Amino acid sequence: MFRLARTANLTWRVSAPRMSRAMSDEGAIRQEGGKLAKKAAADENQYVRQLEAEQLKALRKHHLEEIEEHKQVIERLQSRIKQHEEKLQQIKPPVTK
C-alpha cells in the first residue's frame, strides 16, 4: 500500500499511491474476468430471474383476486336483477277496457 521513495539527498520518505481510475475497485471482479467474474454474473442473473419470477407470481395472484372480486360483483348484480324482475311480475298490469 505504501511505497518507499528515495529522494535526491538519499533520505527515505513514505508515500501512499494515489487512487486512479485503473486502481479503483469499482467493477474489479468483472474487469478481471475469469471464473469469479463468471460466477458473479451467473449469481446476478439468477437473482434477477428469481426476482422477476416472484414479481410475476404476485401479479398473477393480484389478477386472480381481481377476477374473483368481479365475479362476486356480477353475482350480486344478477341477484338484484332477479329481485327486480320478480317485483315487476308481482305488479298487476293495468286493466284496459
Image: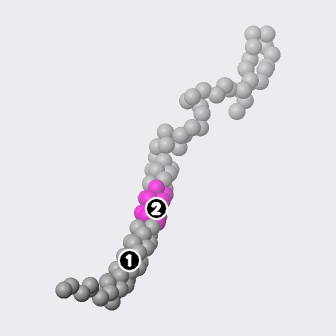
- Seen in the picture, residue 25 relative to 44 is either above or below; the reply is above
Which one is earlier in the sequence, the residue at label 2 or at label 1?
A: 2
Q: Tell me the magenta residue range.
A: 46-59
Residue 2 lies left or right of residue 91; in this view the side is: right
Tell me the SS state at disc 2.
helix
Type of secondary structure dominating the magenta stretch: helix
Asked if residue 45 lies in the magenta stretch, the reply is no
Asked if residue 57 lies in the magenta stretch, the reply is yes
Can you see residue 66? Answer: yes
Tell me the SS state at disc 1.
helix
Residue at the image point whose x is 54% and y is 40% from the top: 28
Q: Quadrant of the N terminus?
A: top right
- Seen in the picture, residue 11 relative to 28 is either above or below; the reply is above
Residue at the image point whose x is 35% and y is 86% from the top: 87
The quadrant holding residue 76 is bottom left
Q: CA distance from mark 2 to mark 1?
A: 33 Å
Q: Residue furthest top?
A: 9
Residue 86 lies left or right of residue 30; in this view the side is: left
Q: Amino acid at mark 1?
A: Leu
Which of the numbered marks, if any, corresponds to residue 48?
A: none
Residue 36 percent location from the top left of the image = 50, 50
Near mark 2 (Cα within 10 A), the count class, few <14, some 14-19 or many ≥20, is few
Residue at the image point whose x is 79% and y is 10% from the top: 9
Foreground residue among 90 and 28 = 90
Residue 88 percent location from the top left of the image = 32, 84
The quadrant holding residue 62 is bottom left
Residue 27 lies left or right of residue 77; in this view the side is: right
Say which residue label 1 marks: 77
Can you see residue 64? Answer: no
- Seen in the picture, residue 27 relative to 84 is either above or below; the reply is above
Say which residue label 2 marks: 55
